[in-house]
Image: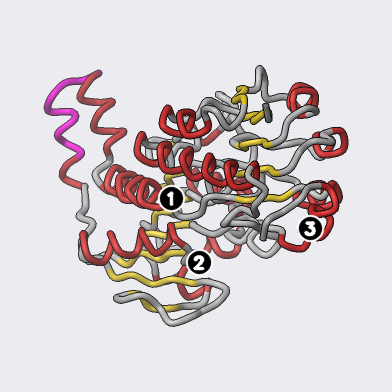
Amino acid sequence: MPKILSTHPLHPRASAKLAGAGQLVIASALDAATLTREAKDSDIVIVRAPLPPALFEGAWKLRAAIRHGAGLDMIPMEAAAAAGVLVANVPAVNARSVAEHVMFTALALLRQFRRVDRDLRAKGWLAGREHANTNVELAGKTIGIVGLGAVGQAVGHIAAHGFDLKVVATTRSMQPAPDKVGFLSIDALVEQSDIIVLCCPLTPETRGLISRERIARMKPNALLINVSRGPVVDDDALIEALRERRIGGAALDVFSTQPLPSNHPYFGFDNVIITPHMAGITEESMMRMGVGAAGEALLVLAGKLPVNLRNPEVVDHYRRRFPVDI
């Protein structure tokens, strides 16, 4: 029976979908050595943790690495291509969860939830309530979205239609904008937005995109929300701006180093919301991602190509290793 290795447990509906098609095994640990060893006799790897390039060198049976989600940065694409391993993902299925997280953190920052909650618990009713005098509303603000893929579009839709925000965006393609979204250059967006939301993939072009210079262009009360990848932001520059109170605050779900060390400076700011890379994780999205990944795995095991194949250039190499019904 084929072996399906998953770095993490799957939603029960995903596990049920795979039942009978293969033996689902959950990795015993996520370090490189363990993943490499446990993938050696695997036919499929379902990915929610970074895979080491060495995993592909010794996994002679491996047909596909399937991302449990959209971002492909956890899969070393060159190593997969060299081994003739298919790479697939399940795009867009957690977009709503991420978009709702963006709005949740924006509201929490504008209503100073961390300060209110802390002082209400420690100092009493009036101390917590006092912060309300400087809280501000979300409606009427300008939200700038960097990256207009599925997540960016979901953020824009909720912002415009649910909260009466002015929505601007920047994206590589600059294709016709969705309803109520206007395009700006990245620099104009940074300068004009009250809330800047990072929804872009991590690429050589986006690494360090929110640089010291761009942070300096932000409005004094602007909020930065990052649900993309940590290296998109210059951490040192952001920490400096927060310390000098040159921006209004930040909500960060992703970091250059994960897990974020407990003594990291970000934890010291009342106007920074830290979440452990969970913006896209809800019961509903876990079901959709798991079922989607399971569906792609079943196609590969049936001798077909996955629907969301991300490295079609390896198909000829792959077909020399395994029969494919295209």
Q: Find the distance from the CA under tag 1 to the CA under tag 2.
A: 34 Å
**Residue at x 66% of width, y 17% of height:** 28
Looking at marks 1 and 2 on the same chain, the residue that comes earlier in the sequence is marked by 1
Q: Residue furthest bottom?
A: 176
> From which residue to which does the magenta span run?
122-131
State the residue position of label 1.
93
Looking at marks 3 and 1 on the same chain, the residue that comes earlier in the sequence is marked by 1
Q: In this view, does 26 lie above or below 269?
A: above
State the residue position of label 2.
217
Q: Position of residue 262 (x, y in %)?
A: 55, 24
Q: Can residue 42 be seen in this view?
A: yes
Q: Position of residue 139 (x, y in %)?
A: 20, 61
**Residue at x 16% of width, y 36% of height:** 130
Q: Where is residue 180 in the image (x, y as percent from the top left)?
A: 30, 75
Q: Which amino acid lies under the numbered mark 2 shown in the image of this protein?
A: Arg
Q: Is residue 197 above or below residue 134?
A: below
Label at residue 314: 3
In front: label 3 or label 1: 3
**Magenta span has 302?**
no
Looking at marks 3 and 2 on the same chain, the residue that comes earlier in the sequence is marked by 2
Q: Is residue 273 visible?
A: no
